[in-house]
Amino acid sequence: MTGVLTVSETKIEDLPLLHRGKVRDVYAVGENLLLLAATDRLSAFDCILPTPIEHKGAVLTALSEFWFARLSNITENHLITADFDQMPESVRRSEMLRNRSMLVKRTKVFPVECVVRGYLEGSGWKDYQATGKICGHELPPNLQQCERLPQPIFTPSTKAAAGHDENITEAQFAAIVGTEAAEHLRSTALRIYEEAARYALSRGIIIADTKFEFGTDEDGKIILIDEVLTPDSSRFWAADTYAPGKAQPSFDKQFVREYLETLDWNKQPPAPELPANIARATTERYLKAYELLTGKTLLAEQ
């Protein structure tokens, strides 16, 4: 992939834009399909940063495609194709969308994040320090930061349109989505995490935690949607340097968060620009995660 420019915002004149999210631009393709275009935008602390991360959208798209295929034995998903040359002509007229777009089924989205944690970090670590629990799960005392949990736990959260997602208990989760759907989402999310975590560990990556999204298709079937097991939705740590009791070097955007924490910034818009070396190092981490997990080199493929 040579001469690639970063893409901070997409535009397709022939398709209606339904939503411009923190990272993805979502277009309607007829009544039953959507086009998810992954930009190079990066959000941290719920703010979109002004500095795009080169190749980020391509990594998110290619890695999601990889995982959707690998996990299809557990659950169906919304992906129809990520092959740009198989997209509708209205999409193919915009070359900037190549390598960063997925044509997917339109679904009715559950308004929750299905978070699974295998290790103690992030908001889970903060909750544990304050209460000894995460989302109602009582945990053993005296666990260290980033310590592996006795078993993975399901810790759902709200899905905020703006501002911060909030951790909720499984009872609150069931009240939102219904008891039957809640059990299906919980068990499916845990199965996906456990299988993915085993595979990733064999490739040298610890998946500390991750979040999934689900929706129902036109037949009422619950399927996996959005992105899956990417550096945007997961914490990826290097297995060979893992050592609990401190923050871990990561292959995800935690690297950017840690840089931003060193600044005198109140975590409100507008977010600060990233220095070139921080942006470049973030690109390298995203590309390395893809390479380790898939055994392929993204830039050589595209």
Image (cartoon, grey):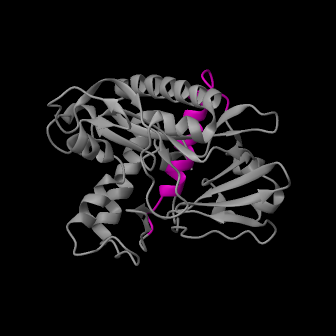
Give the side of residue 275 with respect to residue 25, left or right: left
Q: In this orientation, which residue lies closer to the viewer: 228 or 126?
A: 126
Residue at (15%, 42%) from the top-left corner?
246
Q: In this orientation, which residue lies closer to the viewer: 86 or 131?
A: 131
Mark count: 0
Tell me which corner region of the image, top left, top right, bottom left or bottom right, holds residue 276.
Answer: bottom left
Residue at (55%, 34%) from the top-left corner?
67
Q: Is residue 190 above or below residue 215?
A: above
- Residue 159 placement (x, y as % from top left): 53, 52
Q: Does the magenta stretch include residue 27?
A: no
- Residue 192 placement (x, y as % from top left): 51, 27
Q: Could one spot residue 213 in this view of the protein? A: yes
Q: In this view, does 129 lie above or below 192?
A: below
Residue at (51%, 64%) from the top-left corner?
162
Q: In this view, does 173 lie above or below 89?
A: above
- Residue 272 placement (x, y as % from top left): 34, 76
- Residue 113 placement (x, y as % from top left): 52, 44
Part of the protein shown in magenta: 52-76
Give the side of residue 265 with respect to residue 4, left or right: left
Q: Is residue 72 magenta?
A: yes
Q: Is residue 145 above or below residue 164?
A: above
Extreme residue in the right direction: 31
Q: Could one spot residue 250 in this view of the protein? A: no
Extreme residue in the bottom direction: 270
| Secondary structure, magenta segment, majority class | helix
